[in-house]
Image: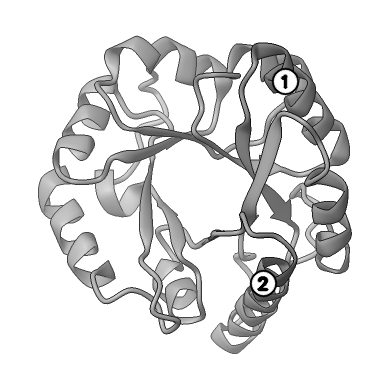
Amino acid sequence: MSIEKNAEEILKELKTGNPFGEKITLVAATKTRTAEEINRVIAAGVPDVGENRVQEFLEKFDAVRGGVRHFIGHLQTNKVKYLVGKIDLYHSVDRDELALELSKRSARAGIVSDVLLQINIGCEESKGGYPLEEGLNALARTKESDGIRVRGFMAMLPLAGDGEYKKSLCKKMRALFDEARERSEHIDYLSMGMSGDWKLCVSEGANMIRVGTALFGTRDYGKQG
């Protein structure tokens, strides 16, 4: 199906929200997608678009028309300076060092950057993020920083494991999210779910999902920018 048809189908499924009565924000994951494809998905009713790589984001930035800009990939501290003021929501604040750099750069620019704290829910060595049990402590440290505002959490489910195991991880993330909302008025987003597992994540309380292949089709990694 076309980008437009895929967007229509997913948005239709998301219309009823999650079991907690929350609206679901669909973020189009645009790694390797052209600016033309991104503009098509925005025009199709998916204004939130997220890039994984700083260089790719910058190359397409001026060619993308409108939209709410997310950064959803791993972010090196030495590249923060290229993004400050251009990103509406950072999903992958996975360590205090990055939070500090974002805080410093944003405050210097006279802005407040919205961020999500990344939780390594599957305890995977290949992924960054705070341990689940450290999530509330990380929130307490980070919410005192000038220049950034914590809006919630992001997590990626492991590929391995059966449905019940993955459900249990989703429930733990939702419990963290709910407890965090009692401690901070700014907590709004639980970003969890990608093309292969977003339905499971929404059913367990995610209210933001990051979808690439299900919107755009299979990626062509030989095509960049």
* Cα–Cα span, label 2 and label 1: 30 Å
Q: Work out whether residue 88 or residue 52 is closer to the camera in this orientation and state it.
A: 88
Above or below, comparing residue 86 to residue 24 in the picture: above
Looking at the image, which residue is at 31% across and 45% down?
A: 218
Which residue is the site of mark 2? Answer: 173
Q: Of residues 163 and 80, which is closer to you in this image?
A: 80
Which quadrant holds residue 50? top left
- Residue 2 visible in the displayed image: no
- What residue sits 28% from the left and 68% below the top? 14
Q: Is residue 163 left or right of residue 15?
A: right
Task: Residue 107: give its label.
Answer: 1
For disc 1, the neighbor class at 10 Å (few under 14, some 14 to 19, many from 20) is some
| Residue 98 position in % (x across, y down) | 79, 32
Amino acid, disc 1: Ala
Kind of residue at badge 2? Met
Using a 10 Å C-alpha cutoff, classify the residue at mark 2 as few (fewer than 14 neighbours), some (14 to 19) or many (20 or more).
many
Foreground of the two, 144 or 208: 144
